[in-house]
Image: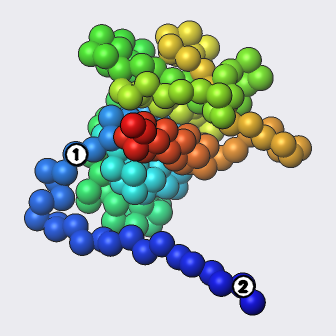
């Protein structure tokens, strides 16, 4: 006989105080992502992990049905920022000057494997455009490039899925640090 145990998480968070609770200093920069569906999924991921912000190319996207459908009300709670792609290099420079490390997430054999990378606490995770990725000038601006190891024939993951995996690894590392003596 197999006994299955489950951990139950207490979700007694007051909505009145929720906005004042601390957030993790990870910003997902999705300025280059065009799909409202992918952006809605990223919003949901960012809110699930209480990340500092999700950067959209245009805040109007958050009003679309496709975004809201996948965001599943997370857009009401998740801080959203706007940075059009043509302003991205300058915005990243400003954030670097305030202490953030820029980490490009790409499907690239020269990037550091996510399994070997240690995230700095204040990180901006730069995601690329669907199909074409991150422009080389933006990659060069980043402090590091990371990739998610893959073992199948498919060469890349959907940007929303890749962003969620990297965000989870960031959170896993932060929790491990917080719990270490």
Image position of 100 with respect to 33: above or below: above
Q: Position of residue 63 (x, y in %)?
A: 33, 56
Assign a secondary structure to mark 2: loop
Q: Quadrant of the C terminus?
A: top left
Q: Nearer the viewer, mark 1 or mark 2?
A: 2
Of the pair 154 and 110, the residue shown nearer to us: 110
Of the pair 89 and 3, the residue shown nearer to us: 3
Q: Position of residue 156 (x, y in %)?
A: 74, 40
**Residue 77 appears in the picture as rendered:** yes
Counting other residues with Cα less than 10 Å from the Cα at mark 1, is it few (<14), some (14-19), or many (20 or more)?
Answer: few
Counting other residues with Cα less than 10 Å from the Cα at mark 2, is it few (<14), some (14-19), or many (20 or more)?
Answer: few
* Horizontal side of residue 142 vs 71, given as left or right: right
Q: CA distance from mark 1 to mark 2?
A: 40 Å
Assign a secondary structure to mark 1: loop
Q: Position of residue 50 (x, y in %)?
A: 33, 50
Image position of 54 with respect to 91: above or below: below
**Residue 22: which numbered mark, if any?**
1
In the rendered image, which residue does mark 2 sit on?
2
Image position of 65 with respect to 176: above or below: below
Q: Quadrant of the N terminus?
A: bottom right
């Amino acid at each position: 006989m197999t006994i299955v145990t489950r951990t139950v998480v207490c979700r007694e968070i007051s909505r009145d105080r929720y906005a004042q609770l601390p957030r993790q200093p990870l910003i997902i920069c999705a300025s280059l992502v065009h799909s409202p569906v992918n952006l809605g999924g990223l919003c949901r991921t960012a809110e699930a992990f209480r990340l500092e912000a999700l950067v959209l190319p245009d805040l109007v996207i958050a009003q679309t049905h496709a975004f809201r459908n996948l965001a599943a009300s997370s857009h009401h709670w998740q801080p959203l920022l706007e940075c059009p792609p043509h302003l991205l290099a300058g915005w990243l420079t400003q954030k670097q000057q305030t202490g953030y490390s820029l980490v490009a997430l790409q499907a690239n054999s020269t990037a550091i494997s996510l399994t070997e990378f240690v995230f700095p606490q204040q990180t901006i995770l730069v995601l690329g455009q669907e199909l074409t990725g991150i422009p080389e000038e933006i990659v060069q601006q980043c402090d590091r490039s990371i990739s998610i190891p893959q073992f199948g024939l498919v060469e890349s993951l959907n940007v929303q899925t890749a962003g969620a995996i990297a965000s989870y690894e960031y959170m896993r590392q932060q929790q491990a640090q917080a719990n270490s003596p």
